[in-house]
Structures are given as C-alpha cells and as structure tokens.
Amino acid sequence: MLVDSHCHLDFPDFAEERDQIIERAHEAGVKLMVTICTRVRKFEQIKEIAEAYDSVYCSVGTHPHQAGEETDVTAEELIELSKHPKVVAIGEAGLDYFYDNASPEDQEKVLRTHIKAARETQLPLVIHSRDADDDMMSILEEEMKVGAFPALLHCFSSGKELAMKGLELGLYVSFSGILTFKRSTELREIAAELPMDRLLVETDAPYLAPQPWRGKRNEPAYVAHTNKVLAEALGVSEEQMADATTQNFLRLFSKVPQPA
C-alpha cells in the first residue's frame, strides 16, 4: 500500500477524468490521497472532491503564492473549517522566495496564522518552502517554543540544514518526483541520511512528474516510482519503503482512519 500525501485533484488538469485518475491510483497500490488546498476561499471545491471518494482526504489552507489574497483568513476560520471529517491537515502554507507572487511579509503572516491553527487542532501543517531556508528555520524554531505542532516539509528540495532542523523540531519530510530527476543527486544523498520513520512520498500532481514521465502531467499513481527511488537511496526494498511511508503518513495524519 502507498499513500500520495500531497496532490491537487481540484486543478483543471484533472477535471474531465478524475474518476479514472483515482482508479489508476488504486490499481498502482495508492490507497489514500490527500488533495491539498491552496486557497481557503476555494475550500468548498476541495471538500466536495474529498467527500466524493472514500480514499481521498483534504487540507484547508493558503499557498504562499496566494498569501496576499488571504491575509484576512484567521486561525479561528481555519480551525472551524478543519472540523469537517475529511479535513486531515492545515495548509499548504509557507514561504516561496523563488517566485514573487506575494510579499515576504504577507507570506510570513499567513504562515504564522496556519501554525496557530495547526497548534490548536494538532493537525499536521503542510509546509511549502522554496529558496527560504533561513527564514523558514527561524520561524519554525521560534513558533515551536510557543507550543509544539505537527508538521511536514512537503516536496522537499531544500538544503540539508533545513531537513536536519526539521527533524530536530519533530517534523516529517516528504519527497516528490524531483527526487527521481537525474540532477537530484544531492537530494538523494540528503534523503539517504534521514531516518526512515520520518519520510513520506507525494506527487504534488499535476506537477513534477517523476522520471520517466518528466514533463508530462503527473498523477497520484506515479507516487510508486518516487517510492522506488527513495527505497534505492536508503538501500531498502520498495515494499519496506512503502510500508514505512504509509505508517509514517498514518502516524502524522492521525485523523485519517486506519485502513482495514
């Protein structure tokens, strides 16, 4: 069994064949998926998709690209929306300095709001961090001193220092198809140094399809290939890696019912 801990099933890329995409995921052994919210104002659409499929859960949150649009979203609003039985995480929220879609100030404000909600609900915070390692480490360290919260560094492609700081603070680390790219030698080396009980896999579909589908539309079924490459990096079997990442997912996303 595998889990796609992060995909975007609400994106237009999937609108016409969502049923078939989820069926292909099941056939590939992917029995659970979390479709991730990028705008709180579009949460209803996310929620409807999660409600439509037994194997799909969702999050509620504001992506850093949209932070400037949703600085008015409160922790209390996130907490209230997270009471829905299908909502199993807060986010994705974070810092993205690669693109200039929102000011660093707005991104930080929105991130801290999401941290407050994650701390209150004890639902895992799905963290997006790109080209912002130092600021992210500083904020996480500061906020953990206020009160602990579960969290995940999603689609990890940052430096080793952030990965190790995340582990120190109790976070989990999730790898996407980026891990399989030929140029990702350093990333595979970082993965090999991380403890097996803190690792997850994801697609971030429709983006970042793993080799050999790179450049094409990604989908949850392809998480099996990322799991394979992660297993190779750690020197374990695909089955061992699948079991570990699934158990890690169920431990972190504790609101998801244990599969029968």
Image: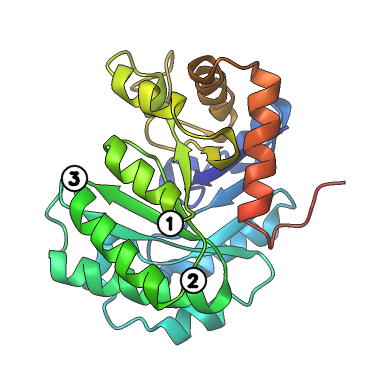
- Residue 18 locus on image (x, y percent): 59, 42
Circle 2 or circle 1, nearest the eye: 1
Determine whether the residue tagged by mark 1 lies in a helix, strand or loop. Answer: loop
Badge 2 amino acid:
Ala
Badge 3 amino acid:
Asp
Badge 1 amino acid:
Leu
Q: Marks 2/1: CA distance?
A: 15 Å
Q: Is residue 38 above or below residue 80?
A: above
Q: Is residue 206 above or below residue 84?
A: above
Kindly identify which residue carries mark 1: 169
Q: Marks 3/2: CA distance?
A: 23 Å
At x 42%, y 67%, the residue is 61
Kindly identify which residue carries mark 3: 131
Mark earlier in primary sequence (3, 2): 2
At x 45%, y 24%, the residue is 192
- Residue 177 locus on image (x, y percent): 42, 27
Residue 7 or residue 92, whichever sits in front: 92
Kindly identify which residue carries mark 2: 118
Count every numbered label the image shows and give the total: 3
Q: Marks 1/3: CA distance?
A: 20 Å
Residue 31 or residue 157, whichever sits in front: 157
Determine whether the residue tagged by mark 2 lies in a helix, strand or loop. Answer: helix
Mark earlier in primary sequence (2, 1): 2
